Image (cartoon, helix red, strand yellow):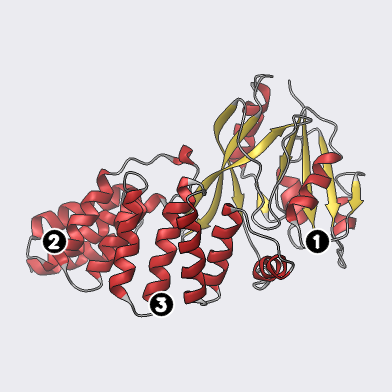
Amino acid sequence: MCTISLCMIVRDEEDVLGRCLESVAGLVDEIIIVDTGSKDHTKEIAAKYTEKIYDFPWVDDFAAARNQAFAQANCDYCMWLDADDVLMEADRQKFAQLKAGLPPDVDMVMMRYNTGFDERGHVTLSCYRERIIKNHAGMVWKGAVHEVIETRGHVIYSECAVTHRKVRPADPERNLRIFEGLLRKGESLAPRQQFYYGRELYYHRRYRDAVAVFEDFLEGNQGWLENKIDACRYCAYCWYGLKQEKKALEALLHSFAYDLPRAEICCDVAQHFFDRMAWAQAAYWYLRALECERKDERGGFVLPDAYGYTPCIQLCVCYSKLGRRTEAEAYNERAAQFKPDSAAVAHNRAYFASCME
């Protein structure tokens, strides 16, 4: 059986680190903790699980810190987690099976990363991330923010998931501060970093600045396909923020120049028409969303609801508005197949029942 070093970078994580380490207890062979300047009880908590705790001065560079953690590893593979990540019980079992059966020629394991949830705990946002990487194989982290290890060699995909469970918000200014610090130094941003810089600008409602960065990113034509498609989406959100709705729709439609439509984009286009009570056009695009094939292995952020529940529940509304009640009820019941406990489904059922009285 292969051996795995868990390599983590932490800072002031006393409220979540124990939960994280407890969730992987007994599954990994070594735990490496690199602390970048904690002032709370983080290191004391870490010491309950490992003696391998190292200090590393924070230099506004996540890749540098992660590479430092990986450099301390002695096992066959390195695995990373953030302090607010956990392995749920079902995923602990999957992880044990994955580790027991991992072929020695595998260079990288991509695992699901569940990062968004609704009020009932259903996953609403996920992606695959490089999670387990062969040690001493020359693969390093790159990027001061939203760091990444380039996928190469023999890569396999696992259904074992890491669940991201925040208990408090991160510093909202940190990522933007790092990006703009790099730019002030005269450093150029690699395409991936450029995309994420644009996203940070969008989060800070600097919409015109964000559009300029995204458009420059797209014109460079060097970025990753999924980032290009997402850049179109974020451009649209910026144009909506600037009250330029025509440009927003054009940005969404521009994504089709890069690849086959994603359900997420089709739902965005549909929502554009839905918000303007253009029910037939909205229905058309929600139907297109249902036709899209979900391929998580492409690596982009996936909104699972876009491939089933969202178009169905919205088609119920569209067809009801169009006076096509039979189809409306049918799509409501189809939405229930995806989310039996949906409050919207229950509301619609009650509405249709009242219409029969």
Image quadrant occupied by the N terminus? top right
> Is 255 in front, or is 189?
189
Kindly state the secondary structure of the residue where label 1 is placed. Answer: loop
Which image quadrant: the C terminus?
bottom left
Mark whose residue sits in front, 2 or 1: 1
Mark found first going from the N terminus, 2 or 1: 1
Dot 3 falls on a residue whose secondary structure is helix
Circle 1 is placed at which residue position? 11
Label 1 Cα neighbours within 10 Å, binned few <14 / some 14-19 / many ≥20: some
Residue 135's x, y, as percent?
77, 31
**Can you tell which mark lies on residue 319?**
2
Task: Name the N-terminal-most of marks 1 and 3.
Answer: 1
Nearer the observer, disc 2 or disc 3?
A: 3
Residue at 9%, 55% (x, y): give it.
Answer: 326
Q: CA distance from mark 1 to mark 3?
A: 35 Å
Looking at the picture, which amino acid does disc 1 mark? Arg
Residue 118 in view, yes or no: yes
- Report the number of numbered marks: 3
**What is the spatial separation of the Cα atoms under label 2 and label 1, in whole angstroms?**
52 Å
Q: Is residue 352 visible?
A: no
Whether residue 332 sits left or right of residue 216 in the image: it is left
Of residues 134 and 225, the one nearer the viewer is: 225
Q: Is residue 203 above or below residue 37?
A: below
Q: Nearer the viewer, residue 220 or 84?
A: 220
Task: Give amino acid for label 2.
Answer: Tyr
The circle drawn on residue 115 is none
Residue at image coords 79%, 51%? 64
Quarter of the image where one finds residue 319: bottom left
Calculate the distance from the C-alpha at mark 2 to the C-alpha at mark 3: 29 Å
The image shows residue 345 at horizontal and vertical percentages of 27, 60
